[in-house]
Image: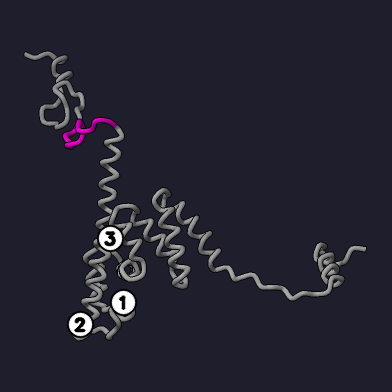
C-alpha cells in the first residue's frame, strides 16, 4: 500500500501543464524558447502590430470599394443616386448588414464607412503610412479627426506635420500636438489696427492698465 507522502507529492495525472510533482511547467505556446533575447521578442510583437495596421488599411480600401459598388447600383439597394466619393444617401441595407457582420452599432458602422472614404479620397498619405505599418489605426483616426473641416491647404499641411510626429508618439501625444496645430491654423489673422494720434494712443494704454478704467493721475 502506498504511503500518504507519495500521494501528496505526486501531482494529478490528468492536469495538463504540471510535472509529476505538481510543479507547473511552461505552456506550449510555440514561442516560449524561440527568442534569443528580449529585443527579439519585442520586435516580434511590433511586427504583428504593424500587420494589424496594414490590415486596417486593407479594410478601409475594401470598405470604400463596397460603398462605391452599392452607390453605383441605387435600384438594387433603394438608395438615392450620389457621386462615387460622396457619403450622403447611404443605403440602409448596407449599414445594417455591415453593423451585423462587424457586431457594432449602426452608428459605428456609418463612422467606419466615413473613415474609409476619407482615407481613400482625402488622406492617401495617411492610408499609405497605415498600410506600411508606420502608424497605428488610432494614429490615423487622430489625423482624420483633427484635419476634418479644414481648407485643403491647411488640411494637407497639418496632415504632413502629424504624420511626421505619429511615428514617434502615442495617439494621445499626437492629439495634443494636433489640437495646438489646428487651433493655430484656425486662428483669425491679426488685424491691422488703424493708426491714431500719439496722445490718444497713450491715454488709451494708460486707461487699459487699470481694472477700474480710470486713467493715472
Q: Where is 66 relative to 17, above or below?
A: below
- Percent of width and height locating residue 201: 82, 70
Residue holding disc 1: 85
Q: Where is 44 relative to 24, above or below?
A: below
Disc ID at residue 73: 2
Q: Which residue is drawn at 14% across and 20% down?
A: 10
Q: Residue at x 82, y 62 (%)?
A: 210
Query: Is label 2 or label 1 in front?
Result: 1
Viewer-proximal residue among 79 and 134 = 134
Viewer-proximal residue among 14 and 100 = 100
Q: Which residue is drawn at 13% across and 15% down?
A: 6
SS at mark 3 in the image: helix
Disc ID at residue 57: 3
Badge 2 or badge 1: first in the primary sequence: 2
- Percent of width and height locating residue 91: 26, 79
Q: What stretch is highlighted in magenta?
A: 27-37
Query: Is label 2 or label 3 in front?
Result: 3
User: Which is the main secondary structure of the residues drawn in magenta?
Assistant: loop
Cα–Cα gap, marks 2 and 1: 14 Å
162 horizontally vs 191: left or right: left
Amino acid at each position: 500500500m502506498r504511503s500518504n507522502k507519495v500521494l501528496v507529492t505526486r501531482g494529478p495525472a490528468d492536469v495538463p501543464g504540471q510535472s509529476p510533482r505538481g510543479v507547473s511547467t511552461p505552456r506550449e505556446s510555440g514561442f516560449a524558447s524561440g527568442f534569443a533575447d528580449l529585443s527579439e521578442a519585442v520586435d516580434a510583437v511590433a511586427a504583428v502590430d504593424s500587420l494589424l495596421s496594414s490590415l486596417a488599411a486593407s479594410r478601409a480600401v475594401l470598405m470604400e470599394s463596397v460603398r462605391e459598388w452599392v452607390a453605383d447600383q441605387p435600384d438594387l439597394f433603394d438608395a438615392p443616386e450620389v457621386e462615387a466619393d460622396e457619403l450622403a444617401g447611404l443605403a440602409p441595407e448596407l449599414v445594417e448588414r455591415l453593423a451585423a457582420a462587424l457586431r457594432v452599432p449602426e452608428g459605428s458602422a456609418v463612422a467606419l464607412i466615413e473613415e474609409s472614404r476619407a482615407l481613400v479620397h482625402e488622406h492617401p498619405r495617411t492610408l499609405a503610412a497605415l498600410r506600411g505599418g508606420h502608424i497605428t489605426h488610432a494614429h490615423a483616426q487622430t489625423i482624420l479627426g483633427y484635419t476634418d473641416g479644414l481648407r485643403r491647404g491647411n488640411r494637407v499641411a497639418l496632415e504632413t506635420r502629424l504624420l511626421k510626429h505619429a511615428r514617434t508618439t502615442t495617439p494621445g501625444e499626437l492629439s495634443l500636438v494636433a489640437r495646438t496645430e489646428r487651433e493655430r491654423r484656425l486662428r483669425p489673422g491679426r488685424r491691422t489696427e488703424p493708426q491714431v494720434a500719439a496722445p490718444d494712443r497713450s491715454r488709451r494704454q494708460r486707461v487699459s492698465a487699470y481694472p477700474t478704467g480710470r486713467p493715472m493721475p
